[in-house]
Amino acid sequence: MKDSQGLIFDCDGVLVDSEKYSCGAWLPVLRRRGIAVELADIEAFIGQSDKAVLEHYRARGAVFPPDILGEKEQAYFDLARGRLQSFVGLREVLEDLRRQRVPVAVASSGELVKIRFSLTEVGLLEFFPILCSAAEVQRGKPAPDLFLLAAKRLGLAPEACTVVEDAVPGLQAARAAGMRAIGFPSSHPEAVLREAGAQVVLGSYAELLSHLE
């Protein structure tokens, strides 16, 4: 990888195979409020923050208590604990990046406590000294704010950063930030990721380093 370049990873669906648990955690929380909801309804929000889910249902008349996000987060912890896995070949890639001293960061729509939980569950937290959450910026994905924050913390210009994303809003955010966008097809097929702005779509993590040269 070229000098003075950094790599920014999304978390859910990119570092941790967690989208089904992250989406699924909404089901009991919403159903307790009398909202008829299926997993596919929540999967439509993949790549966006939990606040986007709340805004969607509030616009349809739902009323939520102030601690609703904490309730959903606890549902995620209960559902995902002991079940989370990473992706084949990812740890080896992260070890190579660390040996090459490539600056890396995580930029996720999840809360910081969720990011730490998920990465700890799969044993990858040690690779990421920089964690950025959408809770820290005014606008979540597909706005560029979160990736611009990550670049700032890496000490790099946006154009020196490459983003790895599985979701349409994340790829749109990367391109809006002026960053190179690599798609990881855990949530959507290659055609969808390319249409969203992915310049490269990985077949597996074994291909990642060759695309960074």
Image (cartoon, helix red, strand yellow):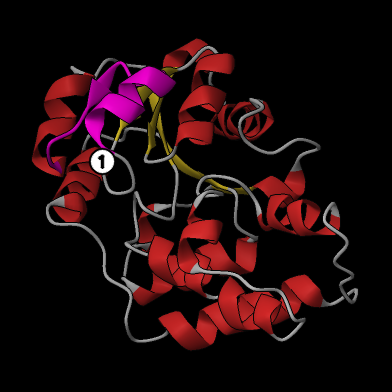
Find numbered disc 1 in the image and state the secondary structure of the residue it sits on: loop
Residue 113 appears anywhere in the view: yes
Q: Nearer the viewer, residue 196 or 174?
A: 196
Residue 157 appears anywhere in the view: no
In the rendered image of this protein, does residue 142 appear above or below residue 179?
A: below
Q: Nearer the viewer, residue 53 or 97?
A: 53
Residue 182 in percent (x, y) is at 32, 27
Which residue is the site of mark 1? 185
Q: Quadrant of the N terminus?
A: top left
Instruction: Indicate left or right for 12 with 187 as reference.
Output: right
Instruction: Indicate left or right for 76 with 19 as reference.
Output: right
**Figure label count:** 1
Which quadrant of the view contains residue 107? top right
Which portion, as a residue range, is magenta?
189-204
In the rendered image of this protein, does residue 97 appear above or below residue 18?
A: above
Q: Quadrant of the C terminus?
A: top left
Residue 71 in percent (x, y) is at 71, 81
